[in-house]
Amino acid sequence: MSDSPGLMRAERVRRLKAGVGESRGGFVAYVMYASHRVNHNYALEYAVQRANELRKPVAVIFPIIEKKPHPNLRRFRFMLENLLKMRRELSRRNIKLVVRKNFEFTSLLKEAGLVVVDRPYLTHQRRFVDEVVVNAGSEVVMVEGDVVVPVEVASQRPEPYARTIRPKIVKNLEKFLEPLPAQAPQTSSLQLDMPSWDEETVEDYLKGLDVDPTVEPVGYFVGGEDEAMRRLTVFVSSRLDVYAEKRSDPGAEACSELSPYLRWGMVCPVQVLLAASKKFGFDNVNMQSLVNELVVWRELARNAAVFNPLYGSYDGLPEWARQTLENHASDRREHVYSLHELENAETHDKYWNAAQRELQRTGKIHNYMRMYWCKKLIEWTDHPRTAFEYAVYLNDRYGLDGVDPNSYLGISWCFGAFDRPFFETKIYGKIRKMTEESLKRKPGINKYLNLHTAGGGGPAGI
Ligand SMILES: Cc1cc2nc3c(=O)[nH]c(=O)nc-3n(C[C@H](O)[C@H](O)[C@H](O)COP(=O)(O)OP(=O)(O)OC[C@H]3O[C@@H](n4cnc5c(N)ncnc54)[C@H](O)[C@@H]3O)c2cc1C
C-alpha cells in the first residue's frame, strides 16, 4: 500500500503508526480535527480512497472538545453552524458523521482498521494527535491539508523572515496547486451501528456543552463551507482586482475576510488560489500579493509553530527584540490601561478603540489596524511581556480566526520577530513603531472609524 493513493502529493501524507498485520477493523475512521470541510479535504479523500481499497466503509469522527483554548459561545456557534451543514453534505456522499463529546470517540479508534487524522500545528493540537495515535488499534496516517506547500517541504528549519521562506515556497507552489476530485465511497457507512451525538440545531448542541457565554456570537460571520465559498466568490469577482493596491486601507473593501474560514479549515488555501487563478495569472500584481499573504506569511506562521518551541510567547521572540524592549521597559508611559479598559475599548485613542470594537463585534480586525492595535499595547502596559499576554488573550478570546499560528506570528511580528531593527525610540526601542499619522494617511480611515463607532452596529455583511 502506497502512502499516497495518487490523488495528492505523497508529501501531504505521513504514517504515524504502522498497522499490525492484515487490517481487521470494520471501517476506516477519519478524525476530522482541523479541516472542517467536506470539499477539497485531503484527509477525507485519502480515507475514502483507502477505504475503497480495503473494501470497508469510511466514517468521519468529529470530536467536540470543550477544553480547547477559549471555548466560548462565539467560537462554538461558528463551528457548530458548519457541523450541521457538514452532516447533510456527508450523508449525501453516503458517509456517516459520528459526533462525540471530548474524548468519547477513542473507543471507536480501537475498532477501526485504519485511522486518518488532519495535521494541526499548535502545541495543544499536536497533543490531540498524540492521543489519537495512542488510542488507535491500527495504522494511523496524518494528512496535511490546510497549507499549500507542506511545512517540511518548504523548509526543515525555523525561518527568520518572510524573505527567507518565500523562494522555498514559491518554487513548490505549482506542484501543490492541484484540484482534488471527490471520490464516491464504494460502501456506505450510513448504516454503521455507531452512536453519534446528533442534534437538530446549534442551540440544542450548545445546551449540552460547557461554553463561556460572555463572548457573544457575531452575525457578521456565519459558519459553513457554503459561506466560505460565497465570500471567496465575492472576493475574486469584486475585490481581487484592487487587492494589491488597497489591502492595507482599512476602509477599502479589498480583502477576502476569509480568515475565520481558513482558521477552522472550512476552506482550503488551495481552493482560494485555484479560484483566484481563474481570474489572474500568477504574474499579476494582485495574485503576487495574495500569494504573499495567503501562502508566504500564513505558511511562515506554520513553520514558526513547528520549529520554534516557544512560538506564541514573549520568550519566543528573537533575542535582539526582547533585549531592546527590556532596555526600554522602564521608560515613562503616558497611559497605562487595565485589561478591562482595553477589552471595553476605553482608551483615549479613537483609532485603537475602533479596532477593538471591530474585534468585539465581528470576530476579526483588518490587518493594518491589527498591527496598530497590537503595537499600541506595548506603549500602554507596564511591561512588554504584559502587552504580549494581553494581545494573545484579546485576539484569541474574541477572534473567530484566533488560536491560529497566524495569531502568534502576527503578534510576534508586532514585537520585532520576522522584522528588522529600526532606529531607536522611547518605549519601543528598536522595534518598528506605528503612529496615528500613518493611519491618517489611509484614504478609508474615516469610513473605518464611522463603521466602528461606539454606538454603531458595525459593518453590514458582505
Ligand atoms: C497582531 C496581529 C494578530 C493577528 N492575528 C491573526 C489571527 O488570529 N488569525 C489570522 O488568521 N490572522 C491573524 N493576523 C494576520 C492578518 O491580520 C489576518 O490574517 C488578516 O487580517 C485576515 O483578513 P483577511 O482574511 O481579509 O485577509 P486577506 O488579506 O484577504 O488574506 C487572505 C488570507 O491570507 C492569510 N493572511 C493574510 N495576511 C496575513 C498575515 N499578515 N500573516 C499571516 N497570514 C495572513 C489569512 O489566512 C487571510 O485570511 C494577525 C496579524 C496581526 C498583526
Image: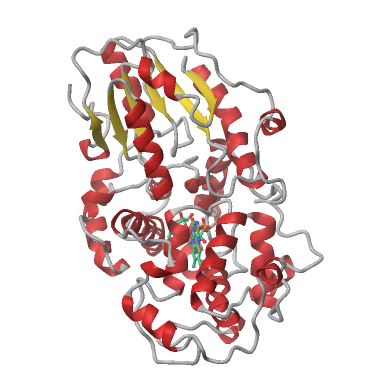
Instruction: Place residue 112 in its image quadrant.
Output: top left
Q: Residue furthest right?
A: 455
Q: Is residue 101 visible?
A: yes
**Residue displayed at 50% across by 77% down:** 384
Residue 426 image position (x, y, % from top left): 50, 92
**Quick check: 243 left or right of 381?**
left
Quadrant the N terminus occupies: top left
Instruction: Place residue 159 in its image quadrant.
Output: bottom left
**Quick check: 130 left or right of 234?**
left
Tell which of 107 and 147 is nearer to you: 107
Residue 121 image position (x, y, % from top left): 37, 48
Instruction: Place residue 442 in its image quadrant.
Output: bottom right
Tell which of 227 and 406 is nearer to you: 406
**Residue displayed at 51% across by 17% down:** 92
Residue 410 image position (x, y, % from top left): 45, 65
**Quick check: 389 left or right of 53?**
right
Tell which of 434 and 6 is nearer to you: 434
**Residue displayed at 57% across by 92% down:** 332
Residue 388 image position (x, y, % from top left): 50, 70
Q: Is residue 37 above or below residue 310?
A: above
